[in-house]
Amino acid sequence: MVARAVLVERPSEYDELLARHATHEQVRFFLERRGRPLEEVLERHAALAATHRAVLGAVPADWRAATVLRSDLDRFLFEPDDVVLALGQDGLVANIAKYLDGQPVIGLNPDPEHIPGVLVRHPPAAAGDLIADLVRGTARLEERTMGRAALDDGQEVLALNEIFVGHVTHQSARYTIALGDRSERQSSSGVIAATGTGATGWAASINRQLAAPLQLPAPADRELAFFVREPWPSSVTATTLTAGRIGAGGSLSIVCELGDGGTMFGDGIEADRVAVDWGQRIEIGAASRTLSLVA
């Protein structure tokens, strides 16, 4: 089968505003009421459109090409030999990761002045050369660990950055948590389990607040770090097992004690959450698959 490049992107700000307000003039009215000129938004829209065309133009002429929006990823079928081009913010790579199984991802940063470029580290103009490196087998790939939360009924959540387990409204959640031979009942605003890739995001914010911060894992480490958010001590709940490392091959166990509202989701995408019922067990650890990111 002829190779295929898949360009994944988000709509521009103008496209999102147009979808919300229906007409060009309504978009102008909305922005002007907030002191923003429409021309600024249109300039970024045109620049992104030009970058989109340039990236697709860099795909080899004898390849197939496809474009998919982030919102359509759950309905898109990736093929085993695809090369994925992520054009946008760093979070776009995390959005893509759980739908892949070894396909290489090239992160392209269309706006380095506003996007840090941790995962989208290449300029769009480099797309052609990076694809050529993949074809020659000379591209350097980073195999980044992903996290997995598996429910006892077979449902699972995969994440590149972090997994959240708690109440759907982020209010107090009750559960029993266990790591190795340690176990305790807790009440908290949820549990976060982060990979090395996620160690620069939500996990880093929580870790900085600890009296004794953890040594967070590196992106390729097969270990995860976990944090309990705002644990509450009481006569029936404890707060001694609130942060630590989930070793390679090991897992963190959580048994839900919520009558309703229990949830787990990955990478902040609450729309893809999995409901967790009373008495159900979740096992959290490193996933078997990894993200292959072109370095």
Image (cartoon, grey):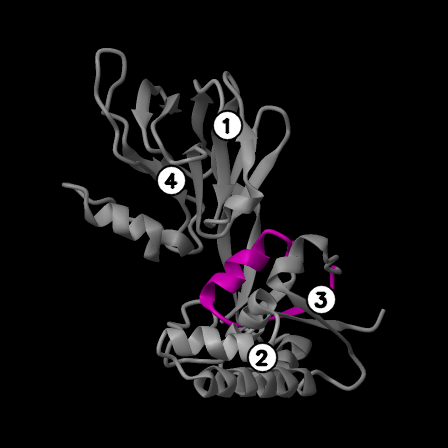
Q: Secondary structure at mark 2?
A: helix
Residue 26 at x, y = what percent?
A: 54, 75
Q: Earlier in the sequence, mark 1 or mark 4?
A: 4
90 displayed left or right of 186: right
Single out the mark in the foreground, 1 or 3. Answer: 1
Q: Which residue is mark 1?
A: 282
Asked whether the beta carbons under mark 2 and mark 4 sit within 8 Å of each other, the answer is no
Observer-nearest of 193 and 11: 11
Single out the mark in the foreground, 4 or 3. Answer: 4
Residue 10 shows up from this direction? no
Question: Which amino acid, mark 2?
Answer: His
Q: Which residue is mark 2?
A: 24
Q: Secondary structure at mark 3?
A: loop
Q: Residues within 10 Å of mark 4 (few under 14, many from 20)?
A: many
Residue plotted at (65% across, 62% down) = 103
Residue 125 at x, y = what percent?
A: 55, 88
Q: Secondary structure at mark 1?
A: strand
Locate residue 100: give its quadrant: bottom right
Observer-nearest of 227 and 72: 72
Locate residue 138: give its quadrant: bottom right
Quadrant where the image shows the N terminus = bottom right
Q: Residues within 10 Å of mark 2 (few under 14, many from 20)?
A: some
User: What is the spatial separation of the Cα atoms under label 1 and label 4, in whole angstroms?
Assistant: 13 Å
Q: Which residue is mark 4?
A: 192
Asked whether the beta carbons under mark 1 and mark 4 sit within 8 Å of each other, the answer is no
Q: Earlier in the sequence, mark 1 or mark 2?
A: 2
User: What is the spatial separation of the Cα atoms under label 4 and label 3, in whole angstroms?
Assistant: 32 Å
248 displayed left or right of 125: left
User: What is the spatial separation of the Cα atoms under label 1 and label 3, in whole angstroms?
Assistant: 32 Å
Q: How many marks?
A: 4
Q: Which residue is mark 3?
A: 82
